[in-house]
Image (cartoon, helix red, strand yellow):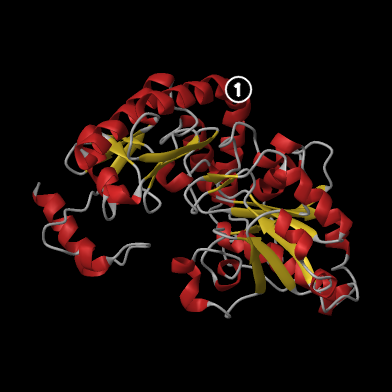
Amino acid sequence: MADTKHLRELDKRYLWHPFTQMADWCAPEHDPLVIVSGKGVVLRDSEGNEYLDGNSSIWTNIHGHGHPVINQAICDQVGKLAHCSALGFSNEPAIQLAEKLTALLPGSPLSRVFYSDDGSTAIECACKMAIQFRQLTGQPQRNRFLAFENAYHGDTAGAASLGGIGSFTGRFSGTGFKAHSVPDLESLEQIPANELAEITAVCIEPVIQGAAGMRTWPTGMLACLRKWCDAHDIFLILDEVMTGFGRTGKMFACQHEDVVPDFLCLAKGLTGGYLPLAATLTTEKVFEAFLGGYDDTFFYGHSYCANPIGCAAALGSLDVFEKEHVLEGLPAKIEHFRNELTTHFNELECVVEIRQAGLTAGIEITPSAGDRTGAKVCLEARQFGLLTRPVRNTLVLMPPLCSSQNEISEMTTALRRALDHVVR
């Protein structure tokens, strides 16, 4: 207890947490959880309390905490090489991972992998590649982007400019790429020809928008968008930072509609939720445009691009997918998750809508339930052994893919009990 108290004091004294109103965090009555260990889908705090990881540690964890295969892959790599620069050098895990990533979409033209650090930088890479490609191919006027309302593509200036959530982007509008948001596919048909001539790419979170409150797209929308992009020679950037690596039931969400993008952006689950690593996959057509000479080089990169330990963790995660037949086991879990969501939340007056894609769900609560109800429910859920975080008044449940059906039931039950305590 003394150690926990001291850690909390130090936290409030020195840390600045993301997406957190620090006045509330630092209030005397607030006792931050200090997580000290994890195993499988269970996290343990500094006081010995255990919790189910109900949002996969902010949408990153795939195979559970402390998976022996990924642990061993990291340990083996640490014993050989912790880091080397990708600027002028290469390393074995990065090479092997690139080969495996391009093979995850068999027969697709995505043949090149550019590493960065997180989802936001993966999007930045795709956007900069798209703009520079147009410059190198005699189309410098094509420097604008299309995105969708309520989208979230990261917080760095360029990625944020494609976002459509005002609380994240409003204060910094005009500081990134030139971008325009549209509400739906139909609205693309209303764009004048002179504006279309300036667009280089469309960016979208396929199947489901995360930070928008887990809002799903209509079936077939992505395939139609791909056709529209082809008809107008516009790149398609898919932000699979959240949806990639099994979240929606397939390795990538775009596979539900047999769509292949021009740029595929990956992060979060890439390393199984262990280490920061991102990848932007693109085509040989895009890659070859940058080969004309020194001035055509893609001058972008980070110190930790292609970090060997991160790449080793990602290789370990892909190994788990294969050896444990993770994707094959998902349909039964997804159906059980759907049944549990329906059983616990479908008839509640305070629930506006339940939205689900694979092992990802958003339970939207009516605003009349009260101010910041989502946050209050998720805080209350800790009393029932569940950790998760809302998106405003949408309760998010995103079990790690390794969750058993019993653990999924325990998560939905805990969230329902918390909702009952707060709303009723």
Determine which quarter of the picture holds residue 160.
bottom right
Front-most of 346 and 4? 346
Q: Position of residue 22 (x, y in %)?
A: 26, 66
What percent of the width, then of the height, locates residue 321? 60, 30
Location of residue 264 in the rendering, given as x and y in whole percent from the top left corner: 70, 51
Residue 36 shown left or right of residue 57 in the figure: left
Under circle 1, the secondary element is loop
Report the residue at 43% width, 26% height from top. Answer: 342
In the rendered structure, the answer to whether residue 273 lies left or right of residue 285 reads left
Asked if residue 40 shows in the view, the reply is no
Tell which of 59 and 220 is nearer to you. Answer: 220
Residue occupied by mark 1: 325
Residue 156 figure quarter: bottom right
Q: Is residue 34 left or right of residue 122?
A: left
Which residue is located at x 48 percent, y 41 percent?
Answer: 75
The answer to whether one can see residue 352 in this image is yes
Q: Quadrant location of the C terminus?
A: top left
Task: Say if 22 sits above or below 44 in the image.
Answer: below
Vertically, is 301 above or below 266? Answer: below
Determine the image quadrant of residue 190: bottom right
Going by the image, does 170 lie left or right of 424? right
Q: Amino acid at mark 1?
A: His
Q: Residues within 10 Å of mark 1 (few under 14, many from 20)?
A: few
Residue 299, image x, y percentages: 72, 74
